[in-house]
Each structure stands twice: as C-alpha cells, then as structure tokens.
Amino acid sequence: MKTMIPAWVGGTLTPVEKLEVHRRGLPHKAVSVFVMRGTQTLIQRRALSKYHTPGLWANACCTHPEWDEAPQDCAVRRLDQELGITGLKPVHRGHVAYRTEVGGGLIEDERVDIYTAEAGPDLALAPNPDEVVEAIWIDLADLTSEVFRRPERFTPWLRIYLADHASEIFAH
C-alpha cells in the first residue's frame, strides 16, 4: 500500500505518493516532535532499512501526515508507531520550512509543524525495529555540541532545527 501525503503540485495541495514527493522534490507537509524530559531530549537512530538517511540520528519523531490527517493526530500516531509512546500531549511550537538533499537523489522540501511533548521519568519506550535502531536521552546542550562536532551522524533536518530554530522550539 502506498502512502499518500499532502504535497503542493502547481500550487495546489494534492495527495502524492511519499517516495514520489521526495524524488520530485515537491514541497510537502511534515510533522516533527521533540520529546523532552527537563533539559533532555529523546533522539532516535533511524532504521537501516529507511529509504533515505538510514542509521542517522534524528529527533524523537519526524514524519509526514497522511492525506486529510491533522498534524497533531499525526504526531500522536507516529510517536506510538515509531517508539511505542502513548499518553503524551504534543504542544505546537510553530512552523519551519526547509529544503535539503537527503541522499540518493531525494529531496525533503518540508513545511513542518513542530511539536514538543514533556515526558515523565518513567516513560515507556518500545521502538519499532522497522523504524528505529535505538533511542537515547541526551541533554539538549550536549546534543547541540555533538551535532556541531559530528554533523554527518545526524539527519539534515535535526541539524537545521538546532542551528536555526532552537529558540522557537524549546522556549517555554
């Protein structure tokens, strides 16, 4: 079954198959979630079977809403599908737009709804191995330093969020 996501074709929002969106570099809707525990954030290493950026570290959840799916509903759904996280209430932090190559001739041209969700100390994780190799908690300052030192280990969007949008995303 092909996943149809909202993308702009000739200025009109249209359902387009996800891989085709990336091949054509079409602007499209996306959702990104940062799960926080105080000053720590949950990051995940993407499954090696992903068609782009496999094995790279990303924020807790980065995804595309399905056609006609509300961004917040998408955030809740994908936290569960990727990491087995339920019960969190994502808070909308704004919008980010970026365009970047992600390897293999594929392009992310995203209009992203950014969310944060505060987790308690006993948050249960059950990463889906089709989506996530591993997930760890890291202090946000340490993550920012590590991304600066070794950017090749991290997804382009995580680098963009931390370099250009951290004050919007993490302001309380």
Image (cartoon, grey):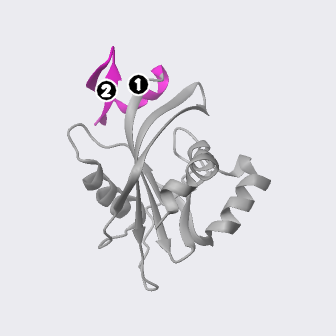
Residues at badges 2 and 1 in contact (C-beta under 8 Å)? yes
Inspect the image, locate mark 1, and give the three-letter code of the amino acid beneath it: Glu
Would you say residue 136 sits in the magenta stretch? Answer: no
Magenta residues, as a range?
Answer: 1-24
| Depth order, front residue of 61/2 | 61
Is 61 situated above or below 100?
Answer: below
Give the residue pinned by disc 2. Answer: 16
**Whole-percent x, y for residue 62 in the image:** 45, 50
Res. 130 visible in picture: no
Seen from the viewer's position, the closer of residues 35 and 20 is 35
Could you tell me if residue 5 is visible in this image? yes
* Left or right for 70, reference 129: left
Residue 113: image x %, image y %? 38, 47
- Residue furthest bottom in the image: 122
Residue visible at 20% across and 39% down? 68
Residue marked by disc 1: 20
Which one is nearer the viewer's eye here, 156 or 163? Answer: 163
Query: Alpha-carbon neighbours of circle 2 within 10 Å: few (<14), some, or many (≥20)?
Result: many
